[in-house]
Image: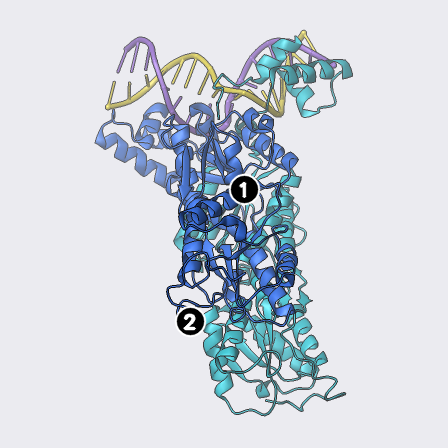
Chain colours: A cyan, B blue, C yellow, D purple
Amino acid sequence: MGPRRTRRPTIIDVAERAGVSKSTAARALTGSSNITEETRDRVVKAAEAVGYERNHLAVGMRSGRSGMLGLVIPDITNPFWADVARGAQDRAVKAGASLLVFSSDWNPEAEAAHLRTLRRARVDGAVVNPVSDSFEDLDRFGLPCVFIGSSAERFPDVSSVGSDIAQAVRVGLDHLVSRGHVTPALILGPKSRLARARFLRAVHEHCVERDVDPAVLAIEDGEYTVEGGREAMKRLLAQPRVGHLAVFAANDMMALGAMMAVRDAGLDCPRDVSILGFDGIPSGEFAWPGLTTVAKPGRDIGERAIECLFDEIDHKPEHRRVYMPCRLLERGSLADLSAAAPKRMAGAGRI
Amino acid sequence: MGPRRTRRPTIIDVAERAGVSKSTAARALTGSSNITEETRDRVVKAAEAVGYERNHLAVGMRSGRSGMLGLVIPDITNPFWADVARGAQDRAVKAGASLLVFSSDWNPEAEAAHLRTLRRARVDGAVVNPVSDSFEDLDRFGLPCVFIGSSAERFPDVSSVGSDIAQAVRVGLDHLVSRGHVTPALILGPKSRLARARFLRAVHEHCVERDVDPAVLAIEDGEYTVEGGREAMKRLLAQPRVGHLAVFAANDMMALGAMMAVRDAGLDCPRDVSILGFDGIPSGEFAWPGLTTVAKPGRDIGERAIECLFDEIDHKPEHRRVYMPCRLLERGSLADLSAAAPKRMAGAGRI
DNA sequence: TTGAAAGCGCTAACAA
DNA sequence: TTGTTAGCGCTTTCAA
């Protein structure tokens, strides 16, 4: 690029050209009301003529509002978080703000460093998926802040936005039941994770409502990875069972891994095994069969988080805890047993 | 977050506490050499004590360097671009800079708007995947700038970083040949796209080297989407052929679509049809079979682009055109015909 | 080695 | 309605 490194025009250049004072020019350009239509015109024309462009650094310095927002997520490469970032981005742009994006890699130190950078950059606020356990780093942030995700529950006095796990689990289980899978096995994340507990609690509540003893559900744990799901499914398949096996995995990657394990065992999905995922990552679309899943509204979450952040910045802390609904994506990994066994009632589990 | 909205400490607070002047404090904190070890110590301690944090807005204003960089890509939700963004991010963070990320959605107007925003934000420079045809908007940017991608070729005097298409095609074709597929069919993008021409040229060169007449290669066009690939493959399958069909698709999405078409036709990949993709998107890993592909080094490209940008900013325009090598990801969508027909020579195409 | 003072570009309070 | 003035927090001459 041939960067024409000539000095960039300031408001003074505009003022001079329009034959008014600095402040009048500023008023005209910021859309203040105390100004003649005629002078405004003249100033605007002058601004265009010299190619004036407001210096946001200076504005931020004077007004205390930099017009920049921070976003700290685990990894922009992860499709869910990319979705969140996209939503946040669009919402910020819509409001004329810019987004500083950072990936923490689930590393509390990186997170702390990024928050420090954001503070120095004088962002007006930040949306964060907190990985740090300690309130320390996060409290120290000292700026308007909105959290994303389930781990945000550990911080009761920070606004947060996340997916509605309870609703998601209900949608998933309802769908499974409608296909005739009344007592699916579960593939869950490690016991240490908060998300696991929330998922499991929702399952239990749903079971109780349907008069199913949660204890009959087979459960296997694993890391939230393809390999974790594969191993868990292998163990599940090793258990004695009668007929069709249905599995609800707490995460699409695990579900995809489970699918591999089914193939490894010489079985067929969905003929022999039905698999339901949770997340809605695009990869699920291209698996064979396509992975039916409960999709988290990543983009909406990002958008909503930015909206909450604006409220936070404007001292309007109305909604402090937002749970966004998830929706079912039917893509073919579930067998339909409902026709084969019509009106099958709860309790007649097949595992 | 309980934002302790007390005034944030400035360098004056530090100076007072350390019993020195503003400028001495500044010198101590910026690592200037003209200062006693003892005073520096005192200032640093004072800074820590009051919790001082440099105001980058003010620094940027004074020094003309905001420490911020812009990144304008088509869509952060697209795995390749997310990869690029991640690389750029990491490299920027490593240098103590922050990244303002924007998605243009392949929309020239959005792109122009984002560039304007970046200029107002006083970023030190930007990495852009240009979608605008006209040099207008981009030239107008007037800041240090590095382009990413093949379309960057339209702008000869701007530094650019991209993948080495010629090398990628060579790697892909070599691999196909090593598996016994000497004259693969091609699924390419629309004729209007520059990338198509580059891809095709590379194929031709490779063919000539191997003494194969490029005219024998079957070619189908389509949009760079799953549906585009599916339709193209359908047409390919409708053509009369003998034996195994091998296809090199110019894009993973198309390759995935092609895979679907193979399944739709009741055929099996890789038994009846071999498919090679180009991009390396994660979805290819979970397709069945896994999609063998030539992967673009998205992360490296992002990293490298930021490095070039730094050079550009520092007026060190050394490398103006960087092509990063791609590598083959073998994941199972290619049949191995080399054993069945050992030492088969070029020209004995099977299409 | 340190301090005083100017000024980056802008906005906001106060005068006119 | 417009102009004048005083900074926002920092770096950077220029003197001391």
In-front residue for pair B256/B189: B189
Residue shown at 73%/84% (left/top)? A338
Can you tell which of label 2 and label 1 is closer to the viewer?
2
Label 2 is placed on what type of residue?
Ala
User: Callout 2 environment at 10 Å: few (<14), some (14 to 19), or many (20+)?
Assistant: few
Looking at marks 2 and 1 on the same chain, the residue that comes earlier in the sequence is marked by: 1
Looking at the rendered structure, the secondary structure element under dot 1 is helix
Label 1 is placed on what type of residue?
Ala
Residue shown at 53%/32% (left/top)? B154
- Which numbered tag is attached to residue B197? 1
Name which quarter of the figure residue A41 lies in.
Answer: top right
**Protein chain holding label 1:** B
Residue shown at 58%/72% (left/top)? A199
Q: Looking at the picture, does residue C12 appear above or below residue A327?
A: above
x then y, percent, for residue B117: 58, 32
Name which quarter of the figure residue A176 lies in.
Answer: bottom right
Residue A17 left/right relative to A79: right
* Residue hosting label 2: B340
